[in-house]
Each structure stands twice: as structure tokens, then as C-alpha cells.
Amino acid sequence: MSGSVYGKNFQVSTWGESHGKGIGVVVDGCPAGLLLSEETVQKYLDRRKPGQTRYSTPRKEPDSVEILSGVFEGRTTGTPISMVVYNTSQRSKDYSEIAQYYRPGHADYTFDQKYGFRDYRGGGRSSGRETVSRVAAGAVASEVLKELGVEVFAYTKEIGGISVDEKRAFRENITKSPLFMPDLEASEQAELLLERKMKQQDSAGGIIECVVKGLPAGVGEPVFEKLDANLAKAVMSIGAVKGVEIGDGFAVAGAFGSENNDSFTLGKDGEITKCTNHAGGILGGISDGSDIILRAAVKPTPSIAKAQKTVNCQGEEMEVCIRGRHDPVIVPRAVVVVEAMTAITVLDMLFSSMASSMESLKRFFVK
Amino acid sequence: MSGSVYGKNFQVSTWGESHGKGIGVVVDGCPAGLLLSEETVQKYLDRRKPGQTRYSTPRKEPDSVEILSGVFEGRTTGTPISMVVYNTSQRSKDYSEIAQYYRPGHADYTFDQKYGFRDYRGGGRSSGRETVSRVAAGAVASEVLKELGVEVFAYTKEIGGISVDEKRAFRENITKSPLFMPDLEASEQAELLLERKMKQQDSAGGIIECVVKGLPAGVGEPVFEKLDANLAKAVMSIGAVKGVEIGDGFAVAGAFGSENNDSFTLGKDGEITKCTNHAGGILGGISDGSDIILRAAVKPTPSIAKAQKTVNCQGEEMEVCIRGRHDPVIVPRAVVVVEAMTAITVLDMLFSSMASSMESLKRFFVK
Amino acid sequence: MSGSVYGKNFQVSTWGESHGKGIGVVVDGCPAGLLLSEETVQKYLDRRKPGQTRYSTPRKEPDSVEILSGVFEGRTTGTPISMVVYNTSQRSKDYSEIAQYYRPGHADYTFDQKYGFRDYRGGGRSSGRETVSRVAAGAVASEVLKELGVEVFAYTKEIGGISVDEKRAFRENITKSPLFMPDLEASEQAELLLERKMKQQDSAGGIIECVVKGLPAGVGEPVFEKLDANLAKAVMSIGAVKGVEIGDGFAVAGAFGSENNDSFTLGKDGEITKCTNHAGGILGGISDGSDIILRAAVKPTPSIAKAQKTVNCQGEEMEVCIRGRHDPVIVPRAVVVVEAMTAITVLDMLFSSMASSMESLKRFFVK
Amino acid sequence: MSGSVYGKNFQVSTWGESHGKGIGVVVDGCPAGLLLSEETVQKYLDRRKPGQTRYSTPRKEPDSVEILSGVFEGRTTGTPISMVVYNTSQRSKDYSEIAQYYRPGHADYTFDQKYGFRDYRGGGRSSGRETVSRVAAGAVASEVLKELGVEVFAYTKEIGGISVDEKRAFRENITKSPLFMPDLEASEQAELLLERKMKQQDSAGGIIECVVKGLPAGVGEPVFEKLDANLAKAVMSIGAVKGVEIGDGFAVAGAFGSENNDSFTLGKDGEITKCTNHAGGILGGISDGSDIILRAAVKPTPSIAKAQKTVNCQGEEMEVCIRGRHDPVIVPRAVVVVEAMTAITVLDMLFSSMASSMESLKRFFVK
């Protein structure tokens, strides 16, 4: 049954396969009047584009987005925004072989089990190329959020065990690092590690961190549609993500209450604020006005040239070496995807928070 | 807007506050013909009942469930199953004080910000008591799954940094440990730690692990309604959970592709299986036929007697010591809650997988 | 799969059978701060109570509602409002016979086909008693709408072919007529007809009309979540309703464009308004600021004492006379049910309209 | 907020404006393995194509559909099917004038009120051209249903008061009539009426009937997701539809119970069946195994050349004559749209009925 539609009031509906005609998304529920152009969306897409550094596949995919509906005279109309990126660089022969066996760490086997057969070209729908749609939709959400003073940004926190050192981390470094790491020293070390892994025909994993700034308190709907619950779903739905955490995340397991609780205090303008932010900006599933902080654990690229044991579709054991143009690490290109899913979710939940009280409802409807 | 309804085809709708008249749930979408009694549901609820060990609040809450609808002559009818647990042991005076200030680590502040005021008695809707509804609904889901040969069970993996040792872990130990730990030696150490923390008027966090056995391959709907994505939401929606991971989870960040990929091989009956299960039973968001494995990070109980800084509703800084009957650790009582949310999610997604192919549809509808 | 949850952002989840322990509803998404008491909800329920006139079943059902959650110190808290009406007057023996055969015009046969068996007592879940939940939920929605200046009211338009004459129709007559007809002369004629039908052991159908006043323009989300589309679903979901129309409804089929179009004009304050209201207040699925007008066609009570042919569960043809306490007409008691479903739908769609433009979003979120 | 996504498990997401780049739909939840080609979908689209007779606009729109995803080697893959029809025949100058005023009977005014401005070219998103997406999605649903032995077809029942005579109605006539009427005599009369109306610069309305054959008993989820409730929403969401009825529909208002009840009887193979079908194949919201019958009332085309009063965007009263290429009647081209929305809804509800009982669930999952 359906599974490619996400969101409740800001809904995105994605489609497309790695080697089909294209990849696209319909964004439904975007408010009317937002300035939106293909150039704006393209900027977000360019951040996941392959071929930018030697740590991403050398495939050349211009990935030019086209807006097909929902924008009139430069502004969104409130009706669905359909966007498409036509595929141009598929070398289908590269992939014909993989029709015959199940690649370890990939969804070949589960797709066959579920659907009876699969579009094997480049992974079909299970390819990372599917995230083009997420990024295009995330661009729209981010642009709406910006207008409301809410900013979402993500970066690489760790690759292959090499972590960003908070003391050396600066936001302006993110775009200077080919791995989108805010600590350039860590970035260099990680690059060396990746070189080694590439020589070993292997791949590495890592951690992406995402921050939301400027979100007002009160966003999130207990007890199931909590802000953190929806962020967890959004980010875990990205291929290769195997864990999600908010604030201190798994570290809370070893912390004690007196350490983990964030004390409330008064800010310099007398406003209520927190002394620390172990909670990652969410209490009881509702934003508390401080930064939202989440992290995603990303597994190493499953496509590696190193020999691996597997089984073919005829049910025979065999050995495979996955050739072709594969990233030695997924993390850097997934940074903007995590950001996109976060933005979509935050905007959707912002909409949901508009009717929390009679007072806010009356302010809206009663003149 | 609404947030207390969960699930797409197997939907649960929960209600109730800590110190209101009761706590309840409506389970909609349970197939007709399931044997179901109050005794069956009660067994699940008893596992989260307070007052069972000295590591849980000494409040006595019989928490007797009553089934109000949806069952006729001992079997479910296919119509909504309404269940209620009336509250009997609320000492409202214990809580009147907390109306005046914002407890650190609690949702007092965010509820006030969102709704304008709050039911402050025992935390109201944001109380852990809300999970009674989840467990009752989870009981129904688990019973359906059992009939299909699918088993869901959870246990404590870690408390305050003390972890279960796989070599000493046995499933039959789980119910022998007051902390629901499958390793009795670790359990004893954790108990000692909790004693210490109680004396220090402090609290501890931990990790819960949940396993699903017998789930057929093919469950999960890419790209957003993936099995892992929905499990992440389900588990993250539980109060105090700050992180969720599947399979190796955050450990994948430091692993390499050649280690993290699970090779396919042939089982003893010639069936396709995996040599390892780093993926936790999910590939591309779809179950692969092996055990589903997930973990949740649970923060330390925020209510501690130790003095903490905070702010009162008049906007003045103050110091608080949260008195009353509070668990020094949330983990043991949350074990059955994680299990419940997992069962609900797995059943819901199982329903969604019934129309994956024309072949399965025809088997169902064409005679 | 689930089917007893209605609404997107204002969600109601209903449960209960005619002769089970009770009937109830969970209302999720009601804004915090609304004054709400059991007395208020009771007033709505009393309008569908049986035994008020000789044209409704003489069963005495006090139908006293109890609010179990979501209200604190007289006001809604923003969390789910659980309401229950315990059943008190079930004479199960009256109904035991109907377990054996399929009553014409009832859902006995389809429930058996769908679920394998059924709670046959008084129709179980398919009983009109299920609408108690709808009315209780509708009461909450109506109270919210009132605060926003939106009023929803319904009345009987026609019974057994006897129609209200617009020239004699006055709103204040509605509660004076035992059939809730705004034209007292038509009401008397309809009463005589019902007397005749009761003697003939037969029953009559009719039409209910519902009006929404004060709804601002701009409510409704094209192209599927149109206001009229959702009203049609809401009203058609009421048992016994076989048709729904908006504005001129089926009469448009015989009208010509020049007659059916509503010309725009300027009102006395220079505001844009319509000369006529053939559209029933909805253009392109969006409210246009004039009265919303809808009608529902209600079939005659299927339970009649007159002999009818049918089949029993053993697959034998037989004849039945449905004895017991049945209304000779469903319409009057369904008036408040149509009103309730309309109010729920209008409120839900009002919520959805809050993010239609960046301008309204900014007014809400940017200070 | 979002409104262009329809369905729960078989979900369609539509986009596009009359004079934008194109019109499209993403169909999510179609089972894998269905034979599907552009030719198949095109056949359905050709039935709503303009320019086929003199009773439809002489605009030439080839309306060629392109499938962009979800089909591999001639079969659906179970992943989203994206379809697009690029717009080729927009004469934007025809429409520039209507930017200045509010056309009576159109959504110009409500779009402006809701969104602040509108894409005025040809009605933008509120144009009937939007139904291209519905028909393309309906084609997919119909093809799935056919494989299951379920057939959906619609035809014109009435135009401008001229009704089909059941005695002269034959299914094979439908495609012979330029108005898709199964009674060729009525068709001729209706054609004469339309000629007259065209000369008078006016337009006519009518009624469309749709029949579903072969649907098994048991489809529909009480109490809100009833089959008739969802059909009502689906059909009412089509622009110009102002009423929906099931079976005898509004005629039940004047019928008595003894006439309106359908007696059960035994068929020639001993199966349970009904003597009549006043209910239109639905009892208690669940299909009963007989034909589903529904009707939609369609208003006259609002665009007429006859002079009408209206108001311009500057708030001045004025007179307009809507020139351009408009159908004198919407009905014939809407026939396939009603059929499409019915097919989509029936298939979606069929999916929902797969988990009605433990028995059916076990048949599916337990080997």
C-alpha cells in the first residue's frame, strides 16, 4: 500500500527510480505568496549533487529541477507544487548484472520478497537517488520557515569514528569542508581515512547533526504527534540511517537526573530560558524555544568493491564485487537530506500548532 | 490539533490524565474473531504497574482494565475496542505545589506555552501514566501477532551505564530480574547503583531493547512508511525516550562497509538467510525475515528530590526539591511500553503489506 | 481495518454498541480554554433522546454523558476529551431472535459477511445508538464554532413527501414541532401521516436540512478536501442517509447556467456578496462567506412490524415481523446528528484553512 | 493546507493548472505486477478529451499521457506511478481579461479570498482540466479492479431534465451517444436541447450514474469510513457536482419502509441475494454483493456568453459575457471522471477490507 506520501498538512508525495525517466515530488500545502524559483530549489539540490569531490561518485548528474505547477508570477499559489528532475546520466549496462543476485546491505532481496520483482537498474526506487525529491521538497519548507525566522541547518558530526571537536567547530567552516564538517582539522583526518578506505575497496559511516534555530515554544502535539517522534520518523526514513537521537540522545542512558535536567532560568530580557540544553529543545514532545538538536547515524555505503558472499536469485551461494561509481561514504551528500526532512517536519508541525488554544484561534478568526 | 491518535489501519486513540477520572484507549481496526478478555490485557498492564519493587514508586494503583466495547462472547467483533482504567490512587495534594513552578526536565513549561494553562495534577496528560493506554492497546496488537506467529518482547539492556553482558543473558532471566534485565549479574549491579542514587536523591537512565521474532519478509512501505521509520516514531513518542536505533544503530557510524554488510547465505532448508544481522532485520525499510532489533535510550527520571534551580510561573528564579513518590529509574516500567508501541506498529504495517502485489491481491479476492 | 476515527486535525474516535456497556467518543484536537461541562454536552444529546414524543421509540434512555478527561477547572486543556454514555436500558431478550436471520434494510447480513459473526443485540455497532458519540463530539465542535461566531443548525425539511413550505417556515418553530419542522402546518400533516404509517406497521423517510451561518470565506482545501466533499462524507456516513446535496443540489440537473449562477454584487457596506445562493455557500470547494446549505435524504426506518420476506442464517427463506420499540421515522432524531457531523467537519476544515497564505502564517508566527 | 492527496492506502496526489506546464498525478499504493502502459491510460483520458463532439469545447488538446515512474518492463513495480500530461493548447490571451473580475459560478472569488491571489489563466487549479489527473489515476484503479473481476462504468442519466428511459437503455448504446447516454432517443432529445441552449448562449446541467459490478460483500469500514461515505466524498469533490446519492437516493425520502427495504432471498445456486436493490448495494456502509449504484448531480457550465452581473476586483459592479471555448454541458466529459473517482475509492476500500477478520488474516499470513 502507499508509503511515498509524507506529512499531515504540509504533504509531500515523491516518485521516481534511479534509472527511470526522472525523480520528482509534489508539495501540497505550501502557503500562497512565497517567492519561489527553480534557482532557489536548485541551490539545495546542488548540495547533494554527486561529482563535487573525490569522495562522491564521479557520475555527472546535472540534476536540474523544473517546477511544473503551483507557482505563478514568481510566487506560490497555495496549490500543489510539482517538481521534476529528469534523469540524464543513467548507464544501464553498469547495473544489469545486479539483477541476478542480492547485494548485501541493499534492499534487492526485500523488494523481491515484497513485490515479486524489482526495477534493478541502479537500485530502482531504493536508490539514494530517491532523496532528490526530499531535498526539493525540503527547499520549499526551508524557504517558508526562513520567512518565519526559523532556520534549519545540518552538518557532518563524525565520519568513520573521527568526530568534530566542538572547540574547533565553526559554522562557516561547513561549506569549506568537502565533507561538510564544521571542524576543518577533523575534516582533513576524515579525508585521509576515506582515501585509505577507498584503496581498501571499503566504505565508512558517520553521524549527521541538525539544528533548528528560532522555532517558537509550543510546537508538537502530544502524545503521538510529538515533535521528536515525527523528527525520528522523518530522519529514520532516509535510506542508510540506522539511529536517531535528540539532544543528549543515547548519552542520557548513562547520565543521572541531576545532570540531565535542564534548569530553567531568566534570560537577559527577563524571558524564561534554560541553563543547558540536554533536552535538545523538546520537552514532553513540544518545542521549548531553545535550539532543536538531532543526530542521525548513517551506515557505511553498502556498495563496496571488496569481495562479499551473497546468494543469487536462483538460490545459489556466490561471491560479488560491486563495481561502478559509488561514494565511499554517504554522509556528506546526506547532510542536506537530513536538513530537508527536518524542515518538512518542523513546518508541518508548526501548522498543527496553530489551533492549540481558543485564544490563538480567536485571534485568527474573530475580527 | 489532534495528536493522540496513532496508526493508519490499526488505529489507537488514547486519552486521560494522571489525576483525572481515568486513562483509556480506543483500539480501532482489530480484526474480528480474536479471543480477548480483561484478564489477558491485565497481564500486560501488570508489567508496568508501580509498587512492584523498591525501584518503582510505592503508589498503589491496581490499574484494573475494563473493556467497554468491541468484544462479544469472548471474541473481538471487528469494531472499536474501548478500554478504561479508572484512577483510584490520586493524592492531589501531593501535586498542588507544582502548579506554581516549572519542573526541570518536565513538560510543565511547554504545556503552558502551548495551551495557555495546564492540568498540573501529577503532570496531567504529560505524566508517564499516559502509557497505560499504550500498554492496553499493545496487548491487543500482541495477541493478534501471536496468532500469526509473530512475537514481540523487550527487556532492559542497560541502566546507569551498567550493561547486559550477552554471554550471561538469557531470556528466562527477564522476569526474574526486578529490573527486567536478562543478565542477573548486571541486574544486581544496577540495583546497587539505584540504591546509591536513591540515597543521593538522584535518578538514573538506561536502554531498552526490543526484539520481534517471526515477522515475514516484505513488511514496510518505502520510502516514508518504512518499518524502521515508523518504529522510530512509535518509540520516540514515549515520554523520556531521547534516542532510537535499529540493529547496530549508532555503532554503524564507526563501522566499515565490509563489516556492516550482512552477507546472504543459504539456511539449512535451502532458504535465503543472512550470516549476521547488523541491519536489525530491516533492509530498505522492509523486513527481511530475520529478527527485528531496536533500542531506545531512556533519560533519568526528571523528578528528583535533590535541589534544582528553576523559575516559577510569576517569572521568578527559585529552587525546588521534587518530593513525592517517584521511580528512581523509568526504564523497567517502560519495557512493556516499548514492547507495546513496537507491537502496534508492526501489526499496523503488516496490514499495509497485504496489497503489495497483484498476486497476493488475487489470492485474496479471486476465487 | 479502522473506520471509527473521523477528521484530520479535529479528530473524533467513536466506540460502543447498542447493548454493550456504553457508547463513547474521544475528541482529540479541541483547542485549550473552551468552557465545557457535562450539562452543555447533555443539551445536545437530549435532542436525540428517544421517548420524547410518540414518534420515537418509548425506550427510556437517560443517556447521561460523563466527561472523563480533557477538561480541568471547567475548561478544555487541549488534550483528548473522552466522553461516555453508559447503557442502562437494554432489554437483550427483545433482540435475541434477530440473531437467527437477516433483517431487510439492516446491516446484519453485511456484518456477518465482513466479520464472520456479529454482536446481534440491538444491531450492535450498526445501531442508530452509535450516533450518541457523534452528537457528543458535535457538541464540542459547535461550542468552539460559537465562540468564533459560526452557528450550525438543522431541522426537518420533509417527511414522507410532506415538505416544509418556505413561506410558513420560521426558525423558532423548530423546537415547537415534535418533528423539528420549522413549518408547524407541515409538521401537523406529517404527524398525521406517521399515525397512519404506525397503524399500517410501516415507516416513513424524509429530508433534513442544515445551515451554517457566519463561516468566513476561504474554508475548504481543493481539490479533494473541498468543504462540500467532506460534508458529503460526514453526512453520508450517518446510518440511513442515502443522499446528500449542497445548495440547489439535484435541482441543478434541470437548471440552466443563466439561472443557476449566483451573480456577485455589492452589499450595503460595500462588501462583495452574492445576489442568490444556489451554490449553497461553496464555490470550487471553498466557502464563499454566504450560508452553507446542505440536505440529507433519510430512508424510512427499516425495522417494521409488517411481514417481510428474508433469509435466515441457515440459508432458508422465511418471513419476519420486526417487533419491539422502533421509531416510525428516523428523521427527527437524526436532525441533531446531521448538525453534529456538519459542525465537526466545518471546524476541522477551519483549522486546515489557517495556513492558506504566507500573510496569514506571518500574522500568526512573526511578532 | 494540503488537499490534493486522496485515499488512505491507494493514494493519489494530483497537481497542475489549466494553463501551466501540465497536469499530473502520482499514484501510490498500486500493487506490483499489473500490466500497465501509456496506451491503456490514454484510452480513459480520450473519453474526457475535448473537441470530440460539438457539445464540447473545440479546443484541441491531445492530452497525451506519459508515465514517468513505477512501471518496469511493462508492469507496475509497487512504487509510485507518476503520470504527466503536458499542456499544449493554452491560449493565454483568451483568459487575461478574467483576471479583472469574479466570474459567477466559478471559484475566482473564493480563491482570491483564500490565497490572496490566483493563477487566473483558464481558472488555474480550479479548472475542469484538473480532472485529467483523476482520470489517469482512475485508469490505474480500474485496471487493478478488472483483474479482480470488479467492473466500474458510468453514463449520462439525464441532461437538462431529459432522462434516460430504463426501457430503452442499453449499455452498448453508451459509446454510440455523443452524450454517453444509454438511451439513444433521450440522447437525441438532449442534443436538440443543447443546440437550443447554445443559441441562447446558455448551458445545461444533468445527472451521471455509475455502477460497480462484481464487488464482493464486506467492503466498507463503519462507522465513518463507510463505502457510501467515501464514494460521496470522492464524487462531491469533482467540480460542478452538487449532489450525490446511493441506490434510490433522495427518492427514499418519500418511500415507506415496506417499499424501501430489500428482501433477502435465495439465488439460483442457493446463495443469499436481494429481491430488489433500493439500497444500491450498500447496507450499513458495507457492500452487500449486489451492484453498487450511485448518481451525481452536475450543475450547468458556469461559463456562459449570456450577459451576467458581477463585481470586479476593484469592488465595482459590472456586466460580463464569458467568451471563449466552453462546453454547453459538463456532464458527458465528467462521466469518466465520476467513474474514475468511484474506481479509486472502491479499490482503496477493498484494500482496507483485507484485515476484517482473524480468519482472513491467518489465511494470508500463516502458512
Image (cartoon, coloured by chain):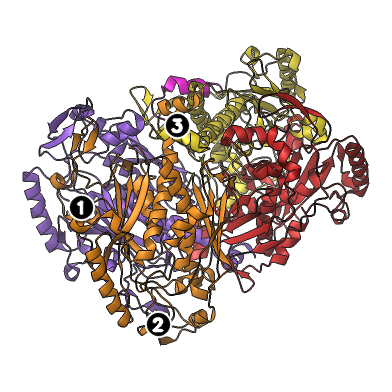
Chain colours: A purple, B orange, C red, D yellow
Residue B314 image point, x, y percent:
49, 84
Query: Which span of residues is magenta-colored?
Result: D31-47
Q: Which residue is mark 1?
A: B252
* Subunit bearing disc 1: B
Q: Are marks 2 and 1 in contact (CB under 8 Å)?
A: no
Are both tags, 3 and 2, on one chain?
A: no
Crowding at mark 1 (Cα within 10 Å: few <14, some 14-19, many 20+): many
Q: Is residue D356 above or below residue D85?
A: below
Residue at the (83%, 48%) spot, across then down: C56
| Disc on res. C18 | none
Depth check: give the residue in front, D125 or D219.
Answer: D219
User: How far apart in space, not on screen, are marks 3 and 2 (Cα)?
Assistant: 58 Å
Mark 2 chain = B
The label nearer to you, 1 versus 3, is 3
Q: Are the residues under badges 2 and 1 in a single subunit?
A: yes
Which label sits on residue D363? 3
Location of mark 2 (residue):
B310
Q: Is residue D168 visible?
A: yes
Dot 3 alpha-carbon crowd within 10 angstroms: few under 14, some 14 to 19, many 20 or more: few
Q: Nearer the viewer, residue C75 or A63?
A: C75
Write the residue at 68% across / 40% down. Answer: D105
**Element type where label 1 sits in the image:** helix
Q: Nearer the viewer, mark 3 or mark 2?
A: 3
